[in-house]
Image (tube, rainbow, N blue to C red):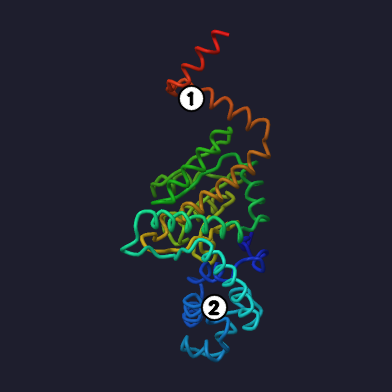
Amino acid sequence: MSRPETFAAQQSETSPLVRIRSLLPGLARAEQRVAKVVLDNPAGVARRSITEVAEAANTSETTVTRFCKAIGVGGYPELRIALAADTARSAALDEQRDLGGEIAPDDDMRTVVDKVTFADARAVEETAGQLDTVVLQKVVDAVSTAGRVDVYGVGASAFVAADLQQKLHRIGRISFAWNDTHIMLTSAAVLSKGDVAVGISHTGATADTVEALRTARNAGATTVALTNFPRSPISEVADYVITTAARETTFRSGATASRIAQLTVIDCLFIGVAQRHLDESIGALDATREAVGTHRLESRHDGRRKSRDSGK
């Protein structure tokens, strides 16, 4: 495949702000200034002329139009309409929860809990909203028929990689998760056609993960990237790109909300693969559950219930 398959087919259904945040690193510098103006005050931009936005971004009207096309909007009028609709939805949701995105120094623990859970829920909702299910289905097909699946991730993404490996392993799929650069590269080098390599990186710019995925692709494996930014370096070495939509807030530099968004996608991928091998998956899950059953401690309630049952 010459180009990775991304969420382009569903762009029209995606929040413009989600799309702008995901495409931001790949925009030209002048377009990034326009993006910052939009992200800082989307409701205000929805009411402003293209000339005013160009002046605020210290650029030209032509650049604003080019920015609109870069994020998949036909032009500035369409952008204003999309922003107006999106900010109205967001305002209604925020008013319902009465929560802001940032955690203030004087927030009490109840407020902190509410803000964190609200941000996490938004990450899941926005990820689901922009997720390209056509691409996801192709990834499910590839994983379902793969000889083996190797998953790469470092830092916080390593936990997500391990979660995918464990899930696939429980339903009888041969899978490995690696987070050491040398082992990632050696594992990638011995993959071949029919195998799948999955690289997980929130930024899409983690050199270790990108290099491992490139090596796997050169070896003939089908490569999949899970990232928040579809135009990041990892997309250049991926046959399929699946995106999340996690925004960064105070104390949350990508390692928390992004991980929850990634795990949501991993769950969808796992369920899709399990569906393809339903009887085998159910049998494997039952067998693994039974195997670890003797390592669970009984509660007093369970013991009393068994005593009552045996006396019947």
Residue 246 locus on image (x, y percent): 49, 60
* Depicted 20 relative to depicted 273: above or below: below
Residue 98: assigned label: none
In this rendering, does residue 239 appear at all? no
Query: Residues under labels 2 and 1: Cα distance?
Result: 54 Å
From the viewer's perspective, tell me whether residue 93 is left or right of residue 135: left
Is there a contact, CB below 8 Å, between mark 2 and mark 1?
no
Quadrant of the image for the N terminus?
bottom right
Quadrant of the image for the C terminus?
top right
In this rendering, does residue 156 appear at all? yes
Residue at coordinates 53% horizontally, 26% vertically from top-left?
A: 289
Determine which residue is flagged by label 2: 43
Residue 271 locus on image (x, y percent): 62, 42
* Depicted 226 relative to depicted 145: above or below: below
In-front residue for pair 281/57:
57
Residue 111 locus on image (x, y percent): 40, 57
Query: For the residue labelled by badge 2, is the local secondary structure a helix, a strand or a loop?
Result: helix
Give the amino acid at mark 2. Ala
* Depicted 3 relative to depicted 63: above or below: above
Query: For the residue labelled by badge 1, is the local secondary structure a helix, a strand or a loop?
Result: helix
Residue 206 locus on image (x, y percent): 42, 59
Q: Quadrant of residue 132?
A: bottom right
Determine which residue is flagged by label 1: 292
Give the amino acid at mark 1. Val
Residue at coordinates 41% horizontally, 44% vertically from top-left?
A: 183
* Depicted 309 relative to depicted 251: above or below: above
Q: Residues within 10 Å of mark 1 (few under 14, many from 20)?
A: few
